[in-house]
C-alpha cells in the first residue's frame, strides 16, 4: 500500500496541455486549480491497460452497453460488496453521465409548473435543473446539528406538501457539505415522499468516497418501501477519475418507472460509450486495492486540511464523512467577494455562490499533498487578516 501511495497519489501529473476543464480555467495564471471534482490521480493501471487494449483494436463503431454482460455483472457485484445491495441486472440503465440522468428524471415525471425539491447548498447542476424544464425549484435548507450538516426536515415537510411538488433530487453523500445520510434520515425522507406522492431521485456519484467507515453509505434504492420506485444514480467516475468518459448508470427496480425513464431519454441521451463502460467494468472488477489505497490517502489529506485551514484566521472547516471536497466557511474574512479573494491569493476553489452559499468555497483535496501544501502557504501569506 505504501509503494502504491507513493507511486500514484503523490505524483504531480502535468495537465495544462490536455484541454482539462479544471486546469484551463486558470491557464497562464498563477492560480492552483482546486475546484471541479476530478482528481489529480492517474487512474489505476488496470483501467489504462483495458482501454489501451480496446484502442489497439482500431474500430470504434456503435456500441450497445447492454450486450456487455461482464460490465453489468461488475456493477451488480460492486453494489453487493460495497453496499450490501443485491440488485437484478435488469434494473440497471446505462446513462451518459449523472447530470443528463437527473434531467431525464425531470423530463420523465414532471410537467410544466411542477416543483422540484432540492437541498441548499448543492451541486450547481442540481440547483439549476428545474430551470431547464420550466419547473419550480422548492429549496430546503441545511442545518448544523450534532457535529454534522443535516437536511432541514421541517422545511422538507413543508415543501413536499405543496400541491406541485413532484420530484426530490437528493444528493447523497451531500455535495458540497460532505455528510452521509443515515438510514434513519433516509427513512424520514422515504415517509415524507410517500405521504406526498413525491418521486425520489438520488444522485449518489460520491457513494464510494466514504472517509469515515462508521458512517456507511445507504443507497436510496435499498429503502424498504420507496426503494422499489426510487431512481438511484451512480458512477465510477469520481472514484476512479474517469469522469471524462461521461458514463454512469441508474438503478430502477420498478419496471414501469424504468420504462418511463428510458423513454424520456430517447432521442436526447446517447448510449453510454464503449470506452467508459470498459473503464467502469474494470474499475469495479479489478481495482479494489487501488481504491482502498486512495481512500487512505484522501483521509490523510482531509486531516491535513482540517488542521491547516482552521489555523488560518477567518476560515473554518468542519470535515465530514464523505467526498474529497472540503466545504470551507470564509465569512470571517469579511470580504465582499470570497472567490475573488482566494483567486488573488493564488488558489482557485469552487465558488460557494454557485452552490447557494456565497460566503463559502469548496476545495478539492484529491491531489498530491504537495499541491495542498502550496495552496495553504498561499492562503496563509496572501489572504487578508480579519479585522
Image (cartoon, grey):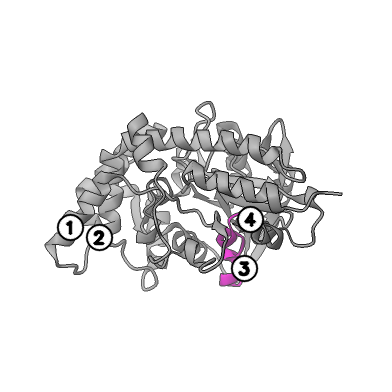
- Which of disc 3 and disc 4 is earlier in sequence? 4
In this picture, residue 360 sits left or right of residue 235? right
Label 1 CA crowd tier, 10 Å (few <14, some 14–19, many 20+): some
Residue at 15% across / 67% down in the picture? 59
Instruction: For marks 3 and 2, give the one nearer the viewer.
Output: 2
Label 4 CA crowd tier, 10 Å (few <14, some 14–19, many 20+): many
Q: Which residue is mark 2?
A: 274
Q: Residue furthest front?
A: 381
Instruction: For marks 4 and 2, give the one nearer the viewer.
Output: 2
x, y percent for residue 36: 52, 57
**Mark 4 to mark 3 CA distance (whole Å):** 10 Å
x, y percent for residue 369: 50, 41
Q: Residue furthest top?
A: 214
- Whether residue 319 is visible here, answered yes or no, is no
Using the rendered view, name the quadrant where residue 131 is placed: bottom right
**Mark 1 to mark 3 CA distance (whole Å):** 42 Å
Instruction: For marks 1 and 4, give the one nearer the viewer.
Output: 1
Q: Which residue is mark 4?
A: 117
Q: Secondary structure at mark 4?
A: strand
Q: Which residue is mark 3?
A: 135
Q: Secondary structure at mark 2?
A: helix
**Mark 3 to mark 2 CA distance (whole Å):** 34 Å
Q: Nearer the viewer, residue 356 or 203?
A: 356
Q: Which residue is mark 1?
A: 54
Q: Quadrant of the N terminus?
A: top left
**Mark 1 to mark 2 CA distance (whole Å):** 9 Å
Residue bounds of the magenta highlight: 122-134
**Mark 1 to mark 4 CA distance (whole Å):** 42 Å
Label 2 CA crowd tier, 10 Å (few <14, some 14–19, many 20+): many
Amino acid at each position: 500500500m505504501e509503494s502504491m501511495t507513493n507511486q500514484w497519489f503523490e505524483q504531480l501529473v502535468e495537465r495544462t496541455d490536455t484541454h482539462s476543464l479544471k486546469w484551463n480555467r486558470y491557464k497562464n495564471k498563477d492560480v492552483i486549480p482546486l475546484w471541479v471534482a476530478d482528481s489529480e490521480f492517474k487512474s489505476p493501471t488496470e483501467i489504462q491497460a483495458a482501454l489501451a487494449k480496446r484502442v489497439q483494436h482500431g474500430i470504434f463503431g456503435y456500441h450497445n452497453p447492454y450486450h456487455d454482460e461482464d460490465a453489468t455483472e461488475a456493477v451488480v457485484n460492486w453494489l453487493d460488496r460495497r453496499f450490501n445491495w443485491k440488485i437484478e441486472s435488469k434494473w440497471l440503465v446505462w446513462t451518459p453521465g449523472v447530470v443528463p440522468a437527473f434531467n431525464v428524471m425531470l423530463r420523465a415525471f414532471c410537467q410544466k409548473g411542477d416543483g422540484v425539491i432540492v437541498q441548499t447548498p448543492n451541486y450547481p447542476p442540481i440547483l439549476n435543473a428545474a430551470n431547464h424544464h420550466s419547473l419550480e425549484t422548492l429549496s430546503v435548507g441545511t442545518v448544523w446539528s450534532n457535529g454534522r450538516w443535516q437536511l432541514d426536515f421541517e422545511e422538507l415537510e413543508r415543501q413536499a406538501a405543496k400541491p406541485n411538488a413532484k420530484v426530490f433530487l437528493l444528493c447523497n453523500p451531500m455535495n458540497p457539505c460532505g455528510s452521509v445520510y443515515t438510514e434513519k434520515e433516509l427513512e424520514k425522507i422515504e415517509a415524507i415522499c410517500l405521504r406526498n406522492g413525491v418521486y425520489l431521485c438520488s444522485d449518489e456519484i460520491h457513494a464510494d468516497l466514504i472517509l469515515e467507515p462508521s458512517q456507511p453509505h445507504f443507497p436510496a434504492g435499498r429503502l424498504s418501501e420507496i426503494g422499489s420506485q426510487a431512481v438511484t444514480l451512480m458512477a465510477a467516475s469520481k472514484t476512479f477519475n474517469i469522469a471524462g468518459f461521461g458514463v454512469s448508470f441508474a438503478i430502477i427496480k420498478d419496471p414501469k418507472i424504468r420504462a418511463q425513464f428510458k423513454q424520456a431519454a430517447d432521442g436526447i441521451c446517447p448510449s453510454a460509450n464503449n470506452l467508459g463502460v470498459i473503464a467502469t467494468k474494470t474499475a469495479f472488477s479489478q481495482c479494489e486495492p487501488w481504491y482502498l489505497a486512495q481512500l487512505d490517502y484522501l483521509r490523510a489529506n482531509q486531516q491535513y486540511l482540517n488542521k491547516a485551514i482552521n489555523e488560518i484566521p477567518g476560515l473554518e472547516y468542519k470535515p465530514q464523512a464523505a467526498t474529497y471536497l472540503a466545504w470551507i466557511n470564509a465569512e470571517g474574512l469579511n470580504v465582499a467577494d470570497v472567490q475573488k479573494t482566494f483567486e488573488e491569493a493564488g488558489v482557485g476553489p469552487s465558488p460557494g455562490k454557485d452552490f447557494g452559499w456565497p460566503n463559502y468555497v469548496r476545495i478539492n483535496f484529491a491531489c498530491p499533498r504537495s499541491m495542498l501544501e502550496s495552496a495553504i502557504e498561499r492562503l496563509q501569506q496572501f489572504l487578508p487578516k480579519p479585522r
